[in-house]
Structure formats: structure tokens, C-alpha cells
Image (tube, rainbow, N blue to C red):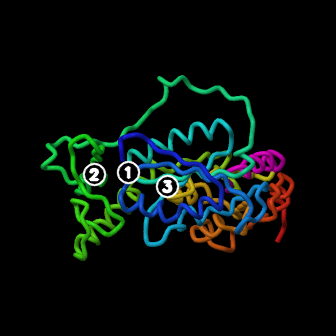
Amino acid sequence: MGGLSAIKATSGPGFSLMQEHIGYAVMAEIPCVIVDVQRLGPSTGQPTSPSQGDVMQARWGTHGDHPIIALSPTSVRECFDLTVTAFNLSEKYRTPVILLMDAVVGHMREKVILPAPEELEIIDRARPNVPPEWYFPYEETASDVPPMANFGDGFRYHITGLMHDRAGFPTQRLDEINAWLTRIFRKIDAHVDDIAITEAINVEHARTLVIAYGCTARAAKEAIYMCRRHRVGLLVLKTLWPFPKDQVLLAAHEAQRVVVPEMNMGQIALEVERLVGRSKVRRVRRADGEMITPQEIRAAIEYKE
């Protein structure tokens, strides 16, 4: 609120404690980045073991209908790149963005070449271009993202966790509540193409498509190399929320089978099944604190019904 970017890093239990204020950030349209390095749960679980079990929590952890952006890196370099992207998206759309990595990626050490600071694209939030007396912090705009003034810059406005009008004051008017809720969804849903990041490998004419994210995508890359004679493609999800539906449908268009490996009981697989049909999807699941291996993914690729 003071005009600077904000970031907070945690793991699953801390992420659970943050849900109330993530909801407040959605309601007040406050840009911020939350890093969740997932470990095995629920509760204290296995504190030193990796997991991908917070995927649905990232989407629906705070109560009420709300949009969210969640990104998932697969490497040390992507941790850097997607952190920059997370800040840019949070500023551009005035929303919290979750960087959802697993403990494998979170503890990973790799040699990387980072870009010079002047090479980075940095997006700042839109600022008011009207006098303070004309400013409304939640006014509808063409982009659906209202300009955001800094505290101390002469713009006085109200912030609340209650449903509010364009001035930020609590309201019970149905038209104002519906207009606000429609707008915060529209500002994300109308720009999925700008937000969704995926990496497609050999998906053209693939008979089997593997969809993976985080550290599991690294095992999946090795698995499709091992199975290259079987016409196998891979779609790596760098954006988990909003779910990249168009990219998944395009990649899976000709696939007879879709393999979804993930270190949980099948959270992203649920989204894939909604799009391509449950009969086409084969889940590869581990929720015991161990990584999914290329051999496990290969076995699912080569499995004959």
C-alpha cells in the first residue's frame, strides 16, 4: 500500500495461516507475492519431504468466490524468472500471486546465468492521473484494473475487507456487489492468454500426452525421452491458476491417453479430466514424500489397458 512490492515466503503450515489475509488482499486488490514451498502434509506432516499437495489450496484456500494467479517453477532459473513474472502480474492486475514450488525445487542448486537488471521487464501498477478529489480506488476502468494511489501521496481513500463501493466504503447494494465481483473475475479471466505460461514438447500428433509441473516435469522430460518411439509429448504447466485450458485442449487434441504425474492424490488431474474426459486420463500419484521417477511415468506411458 505504500507503493513498494511485497513478498512473503513460507511452506504449507504457514500458507494455511495466511489464507485469511490472502482473501483480504483479493478483496482490497493489493498486489503481493506469496511463495509456498510445498512439503508433505496435512498438518505438520513430514516437514523435510517434498509434496505438490497445496495446488487446490492455492486456488481455493481462502473462502468465498475469487480469482487467483499461481505459478510453478521447475528449475532454479525459473524460480528467478517466475518471481519477476509474479511481481509483474501482481502489479498489472492488482492481485496476490502465488509462487507455488515444491521442496525439491526449493532446495535445488543449479548453475544459472541471470539477466542483467536492465534487461528485465518490470511492470509497475497503474497510478491515478486525476486530482485527489476525483479519485476512486475501485472505479471501473477499460482494463478492469483501477489505478492505485500510494499512501502519503495526497490521495485519501478507504480500505476494507467488506464488500465495498468504488470509493472503498462498505456497501450492501446488490448492484455494487455484483459489479465488483464480476470485475475482479473479468480482470483475470479476460487475460488468461497473458497469464498462462506453458512449455510444449513434441505435442504435435502425440498419441500420449504427459502433463506435469514443478519437479515432476523434470522426471517427465526424461520419461518422454525414454519413450520417444511411442510418439509421446509433454506439456509443462508453468501457470497452474488460472488453469491454462486452451493450451491443454490444444496439446491433447490428438492424444489417445493423457498421463498426469503429480506428488499428490491427483489435484491437477481433476482439472485435466474436466477438459478431456476421465477415460483418457491416467494418473501417476505419490503422496509419501518421495519424488515421482521417470521410470514410474514411463510405466504409465507404456501401460496397456
The picture places residue 300, in percent across and down from the top left corner, at 81, 62
In magenta, the rendered stretch is: 211-229
Q: Quadrant of the C terminus?
A: bottom right
Alpha carbons under labels 3 and 1: distance apart: 11 Å
Q: Which residue is mark 3?
A: 69
Classify residue 73 as left or right of residue 285. Answer: left
Query: Sequence-wise, which precedes: disc 3 or disc 2?
Result: 3
Say which quarter of the image contains residue 288. Answer: bottom right
Residue at image position (29%, 65%) is 180
> Which numbered marker is on residue 94?
1
Dot 2, crowdedness within 10 Å: few (<14), some or many (≥20)?
Answer: many
Alpha carbons under labels 1 and 2: distance apart: 8 Å
Residue at image position (59%, 64%) is 16
Residue at image position (68%, 38%) is 76
Classify residue 144 as left or right of residue 32. Answer: left
Q: Amino acid at mark 2?
A: Pro
Dot 1, crowdedness within 10 Å: few (<14), some or many (≥20)?
Answer: many
